[in-house]
Image (cartoon, coloured by chain):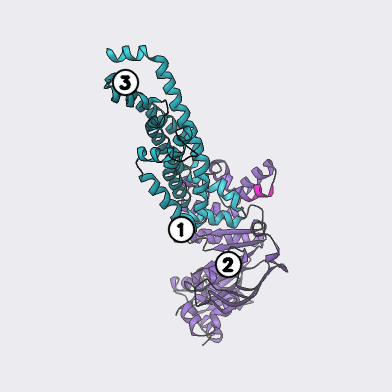
Chain colours: A purple, B cyan
Amino acid sequence: MIEIDGVSKRYNGQGKLAVDNLSIKIEAGEICVFIGPSGCGKSTTLRMINRMIEPSNGTIKIDGEDITKSNPDKLRMRIGYVIQQIGLLPHKTVGENIAIVPRLYGWPKELIEKRVVELLDTIGLDAAVEKDKYPSQLSGGQMQRVGVARAMAVDPSIMLMDEPFGAVDPIARTRLQDEFLRLQKNMKKTICFVTHDIDEAIKMGDKIAIFNEGKLVQFDTPSNILTNPAGDFVKDFIGSDRLAKRLKLISAGEIAKRIDSLSGCEMMHAIEHTASIQETMSFMIEKDAEYVGVINKGKLSGMISFADIRSYMNKRAGV
Amino acid sequence: MELIAFIDKNMPMIFEYLGSTFILVVLATVLSLAIWVPVGIAISKNQKWEKTIVGTASVIFCIPSLAMFTILITIPALGISRKSALTALVLYAMMPLVKSVHQGIKGVNQSVIEAAKGMGMSARRILFEIELPLASPVIFSGFRVTVVMITGISTIATYIGERNLGRLISQGLQRQNMEMIITGSILISIIAIILDMLLELAGKKIVPKGLRIEKN
């Protein structure tokens, strides 16, 4: 758990505070996304957690311990750090890059070897082929994956990621996001993730912290932020398609009406209960159907219609 | 040919001068590296001194070599001795070495440093395992230039008493002896060229492999 308490940062010669009296608690095992416009203080906040920047006031505690009690280098060895430009050492191989923190810890060679191969497999790269390549021989997406693997080398429980998927094309980015979410299901690391992309924040975050001009404007789950945005800034920042974004978060199973008998329903189109409402509506439009069935564990478990969707969303819509 | 006869007749003297040249060049190079590389590293870390040091080096570099040697021998501690010659050569080496070390380190990709620092590498480790290796191509090319320059200027040291290949040229001019002049000039040029070629080969070994790999 990361506790940021009354933290401010003022840079020399600047009138405004880069971070203004921030207090936030990031729960263990969650992905907390920091988002906001340029210069809002999200990256500064992130970098105060691993002491790349020192706060002007306030304290930051990790698992109850004040971070200023640790030597900064030792602290950073315990925290995974991924940056947008990745920063792979160009004169070292992929394997040597991943081995950096294990080497700092003094792990034995065989253990490091094993871990490097293990990590490359985890991030979807062929260890035998890629391990001895140099960064200049990798594609952007591959470099990004190696950057993430390198940060996970000693299996730190906390990871700080600053626009980690920003430097690749949208298709690669989606794949990286999906794979990272899949890994997180097992890893359950505490992750602080900076982005400027609201869709990425909604997709990746268990909680989202919206910053503006150094201040924390709203801190809540994606769903709550979409239904109850705290003021005009948040509304504008999310965008006018706020309600449409919610459609991606809610699944068909949540809205479907249960049905007990199958009579008259055999010929109906059906969709998995885990599909989002956005996918469900696309499906219904495609099949030109007013209602479709909802499948759970291979069996028809309910029914959903356009009217059902409309009244559900309307009831929950924030003003 | 008269040239070959001259060389044949004066082998011992030519060897003495060759040896003297080598010793002077090697001593000056080692001293220069020992002094100026740390200075170059220091000004990369401390902006404050950067302008002063680089400015001083540039001014020194502009002083004509004959004038430099002459001024130095008037200093009591130095006098007409190898010390003056070495001092002059080391002073001239300041510019290319300090500049190339400074530029090399400044030219290292900052996101690599950021990532390394964020992983917990100490400043010392970053300097020795990342900054210097990545700066090595630039530093090494500055080193090559320095060696060739020292070789050339070492010949001027003959005017303050050094008995090296420059002597063939200066005596040859005095006595109007073409064979002396040509022998001296060709030999010193060959040495400079050979040193440069050797350093080019050495450079290939020293520069980290990862920096020389071609992009796919």
From the viewer's perspective, is the residue at label 1 or at label 2 nearer? Answer: 2
The residue carrying pointer 3 sits among few (fewer than 14), some (14 to 19) or many (20 or more) residues within 10 Å by Cα, namely many
Q: Which mark is residue A168?
A: 1
Q: Position of residue A121 (x, y in %)?
A: 60, 48
The residue carrying pointer 2 sits among few (fewer than 14), some (14 to 19) or many (20 or more) residues within 10 Å by Cα, namely many
Q: CA distance from mark 1 to mark 2?
A: 21 Å
Determine which residue is flagged by label 3.
B180
At 70% from the left edge and 43% from the top edge, which residue is drawn?
Answer: A108
The residue carrying pointer 1 sits among few (fewer than 14), some (14 to 19) or many (20 or more) residues within 10 Å by Cα, namely some
Near-viewer residue (A177 or A288): A177
Are discs 1 and 2 less than 8 Å apart at CB? no
Which chain is disc 1 placed on? A
Which chain is disc 2 placed on? A
Name the amino acid type tagged 1.
Val
From the viewer's perspective, is the residue at label 1 or at label 3 nearer? Answer: 3
Q: CA distance from mark 1 to mark 3?
A: 66 Å
Residue A21's quadrant in the figure? bottom right
| Magenta stretch, residue numbers | A101-106
Q: Position of residue A74 (x, y in %)?
A: 67, 57
Q: Tag 3, which secondary structure?
A: helix
Q: Position of residue B185 (x, y in %)?
A: 32, 26
Q: Up-down: is B111 above or below B31?
A: below
At 66% from the left edge and 45% from the top edge, which residue is drawn?
Answer: A112
At 33% from the left edge and 21% from the top edge, which residue is drawn?
Answer: B183
